[in-house]
Amino acid sequence: MTLTRRGGRRRLGLLLSGTLLLAGCGAAGAERTATATAQPTPSAARSFGPGAAGAGDPYFPSYGNGGYDVAHYTVKVRYDPATDRLTGTTTLRATATMDLSAFNLDLAGLTVRSVTVNGARATHARVDDELVVTPATGLTAGNGFVAEIRYDGEPAALDNDVLGTGGWLHTSDGAIALGQPESASTWFPVNDHPSDKATYDFEITVPKGLTAISNGVPKGRTTRGNWTTWAWSEGAPMASYLTTVVIGKFRVTTGEHNGRPVYSAVTTKVAEGAPDRSIARTTEVADYLESVFGPYPFDAYGGVVVADERIRYALETQTRPVYSASFFRQGDNTGVVAHELAHQWFGDSVALQKWQDIWLNEGLATYAEWLWAEHTGTSTVEHTFEQKYTGASGQVWRTPPGKPGVANLFGESVYERGGMTVHALRVAVGDTAFFTILRTWAAENQNGNATTAEFVALAERVSHKKLGKLFDAWLYGTERPAAPKPL
């Protein structure tokens, strides 16, 4: 993400407790009961209980949920900007990770009309922004299940503590669903934490004449009467906050690069010029980053430029970053494109396990901007580092990027000191080891989640150097570290 402001409110969560004892579920339960009858054991009856109403992230305890792992979402929504009304059906395929009597989904606002689990009607209840689903029978750990939720209403924005307004935003000609660290729950029920990545199919139906853009590979559109359905598919695992839908009128460009589709769009609310030229260089920037970080990790390229005063940032929505038009008011800006495209490797393909480690996303993406500037001849990495190192504010040094706290999650330290940490590592281990670290990190963790501790361990493994003191000083210290030097 690249941003220019912060603000907001945090979503409240719900903690559930209690257990439900069941003899078994379906054929598998019958087999277990028969075995237990022949050879009685203390575990003859399974103990079913509700999944946690939170993924356990220390920074955002109510985000996400426990007890299951989602593999795939199919999200079908119909939206009419004239009435600001959304009607949706979301189907998710998941696996229970414990014996579940009930499970939660994150859903902000909207009215749930029905829920089924494995084809059978399920009981559902709402508590704040949590949808609590109780299946007709318990869900056994290790077994897959399919849940379908039908819902409708006027989708609303979320104000969170660190970024300001996000989520579903009604615009003059459509809507924008965007935001970090959360946004997806404003338009579909979801396990809304990066630790539960999934693949997605989207079908977005809007009035004819409007464009509906989302993540992944475009799968075409169909028009019936006055409505057009746009289909998109993201086949690589994606964190829920990286999902997006942008509805409105756009200048759309399409093509193909390296055998992958390219789909980019610029809102017609801004004049043709710098925004169009800047995102037109998406594949050029991606090719350069590929030479540094390793193969581009996804099946599509693109970008979307929007113009809305509530969005003063760019976000690395997977395969198709969304940029505020404000980034291009002074002319062409490929630096922000480099930042958001670097996130396709670091933040999207290699995602966070917990929000405290946000520097892994933003520090590496910031460093990618410095590399791109050097590649284009506008500066050198060393010069940029020196400017940041000597000119950083006291707040940057007082705020440890490896443990910034919720209020500073997208603060200057995470970005600038995060980028300086990456350069300090480069100086310490040398270029050969450094670029091997970046490529290995991207390759070994592709489509997964990772932590700072794992990054440090990999850096030490590749460089054959002890780096604990370096990372402690740059990530967790509250004073300016000594200038970096080779180890």
Image: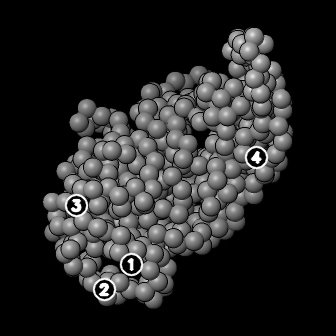
Tell me which numbered mark, 4 or 2, is placed earlier along the sequence.
4
Q: Residues within 10 Å of mark 3 (few under 14, many from 20)?
A: some
> Do the CB atoms of the residues marked 2 and 1 lie less than 8 Å apart?
yes
Residue depicted at x 52% and y 24%? 222
Mark 3, residue position: 463
Mark number, residue 130: 4
Distance Cα–Cα, label 2 vs label 1 = 9 Å
Q: Nearer the viewer, residue 418 or 254?
A: 418
Mark 2, residue position: 482
Mark number, residue 473: 1
Q: Amino acid at mark 1?
A: Ala
Distance Cα–Cα, label 3 vs label 4 = 45 Å
Q: Position of residue 380 (x, y in %)?
A: 19, 73
Q: Is residue 121 visible?
A: no
Of marks 3 and 2, the one in the foreground: 3
Q: Position of residue 374 (x, y in %)?
A: 19, 68
Tell me which numbered mark, 3 or 2, is placed earlier along the sequence.
3
Quadrant (top left/top right/bottom left/bottom right) for the N terminus: bottom left
Tell me which numbered mark, 4 or 1, is placed earlier along the sequence.
4
Tell me which numbered mark, 1 or 3, is placed earlier along the sequence.
3
Q: Amino acid at mark 2?
A: Ala
Dot 3: element: helix
